[in-house]
Each structure stands twice: as C-alpha cells, then as structure tokens.
Image (cartoon, helix red, strand yellow):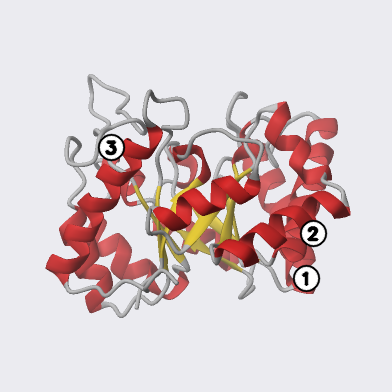
Amino acid sequence: MKSLGIYEKALPKTDSWQQRLQQAHDLGFNFLELSIDESDERLARLDWTKAQRAEVRDASWQTGVRLHTLMLSGHRRYPLGSADPAIREKSLEMLYKAIDLAGDLGIRNIQLAGYDVYYEPKTVTSREYFIENLKRGVAYAAAKEVMLDIETMDDPFLNALTKIKDIKTQIRSPWLQAYPDVGNLTAWPENNVGQELERGIDNIVSVHLKDTLPVTAESKGQFRDVPFGDGTVDFEGCLRTLKRLNYGGAFTIEMWTEKADDPLAEVKKAKQFFDDLFERVGLEQEPVV
C-alpha cells in the first residue's frame, strides 16, 4: 500500500498544528510534508524549543497524521555552494539543525533542494563547495539515522536522477538518496522521464507529484502553480513505471494553495485527481486511520 501526503503550503495558514494536521487527516492524507523555506518565519522553525517540538509531535500522534518528510528549500537563500564563506557556514548550520529537528519530530526524510547556488553565478567552485558541504551533512545525518534526499530541480544543476547518481559516486552513503519531482523531471526536454525513473529507482525514497509546463527555446517553463492535468506531466505513465519497478515509497502532492480563496477545495480537487489515477493504475493507498 502507498502512503499519500500533502505539502504543508497547500493547506490554509494557521498557528495551530492540531488544526493543520487534522485538516490533512480529514482530507484523506497519511502524512504532511513540513516546510522550511527561505522565509524568516519558517527558518525560525529550526530553532523551535523543546516545548514547540513536543506540540507538533503530540499533534501528529493525536491526529494520526505522520510527519514523513521535511522540505528544506531554505538552502535556496543560503546555498551549500555559495562563494561567501559566511553563507556556506550558515547553510551547513541550517542542515545540521534540520537533521536534529527531524530526529525530534520522527521525520524520516529531509528533501534537499539540489542547487549548488541559486542567486549567484554557477562555477566549478560552487559545485565543489556544494559537494564538500553535502558530504559533511550526510555524515551528520548518518549519525542521527536521518535520510537526506536530493530533489530533481527547476534548475539545470541537478535536474535529473542520473545527475543525482553522479553525486552519489562522490558521496558514497546509504543516507544520501533521491526525491524526484515528476513535474521537474518532465519539464526539462533532455530528460527521458521513463528512463530516468528506471535508472534512478534504487535511490528513490519519495516522489513529488506536481504538474509543470516545459522548458523550450522560447520559454523558461513553469515549475509551480500549474493545475493538475493542465501541464505536460504524464502522471499515469510515471505511476505505471514506478509500479512496474516495485517502488515502495511514499507520494506527496505538492501545491502552494495556502493563500487561495478556498485552499481546502483546491486540495480536495487534487486529491480526487490522484485517487482516480491510483485506482486506474492499480496502486492501493494506505487507509487513513
């Protein structure tokens, strides 16, 4: 059975973790993906007190909604490969704190944004800094038994599972794996999505479900806020491929509807879209307790 989760930013904003997780439960999800993005508000979560962590953990137990994954997209602002040593130090400190937070909350996987740098020029040096600091992070994660998963990105640096496999040849550890986004994979014309999934299957620990519009000679593509079914992702093909490959991990619906007029209605629509697809493909979902 496959567990299906929802990205935190799909749900209405609230200060109550009990309410947030209960909404996820009532919508039919098994888990919630926690967001630590580049905003000061969410970066502050890395410094939650013991009591704040206990509140989140207890809400998870009470609602039955797990916190499977943490999306650490804050590395976009503070990248591991920055030319600025102070930013690199901050980036590594963020990664260590995220690993500690994951351990306290029972989170199994931290999704890493696969950027060497985002707001800076990319160089051979930025790639080297990225690998050097990622290696340090993986060693820390291994000691805490928390998995680090590189996402296939909206950026050419790591936009394919084969590129993540290349990174793994430099950092040989079972605690470094891949978290493909089928939307991002599809948007890059050089990717053969089916082959990417086949070649990367041994490293895939979780999958993002998101629609996108492709990168072309005339367009930079659209990597978010594309309604499901309006983009070019062949979701049925991806799911059938993953089923044939005996993929056993979880799926997360990625949406940014927390500020929509009716976020819950948007999430219900997306949930039905994937419920229908899972049934058609023959993937059995884990029941919501």
Quick check: 10 left or right of 108?
left
> Between residues 150 and 269, which one lies in front from this camera angle?
269
Residue displayed at 31% across by 64% down: 197
Q: Position of residue 253 (x, y in %)?
A: 38, 50
Q: Amino acid at mark 1?
A: Lys
How packed mark 1 is, by other alpha carbons closer than 10 Å (few <14, some 14-19, many 20 or more), is some
Quadrant of the frame with the C terminus: bottom left
Q: Residue at x 84, y 40 (%)?
A: 89
Residue 212's disc is 3
Sequence-first tag of 3 and 2: 2
SS class, disc 2: helix
- Residue position marked by numbered label 2 in the rendering: 100
* Residue occupying the far top of the picture: 218
Residue 37 x, y percent position in the rendering: 62, 36
Residue 46 image point, x, y percent: 78, 45
Which mark lies nearer to you, 3 or 2? 2
- Quadrant occupied by the N terminus: bottom left
Task: Kindly state the secondary structure of the residue where label 3 is placed.
Answer: loop
Q: Is 147 rendered above or below residue 118? A: below
Residue 13 sits in quarter: top right
Q: Which residue is mark 1?
A: 144
Does 90 appear above or below 66? above
Find residue 85 and report its horizontal and vertical position in percent: 83, 34
Tell whether label 2 touches label 1 (CB within 8 Å): yes
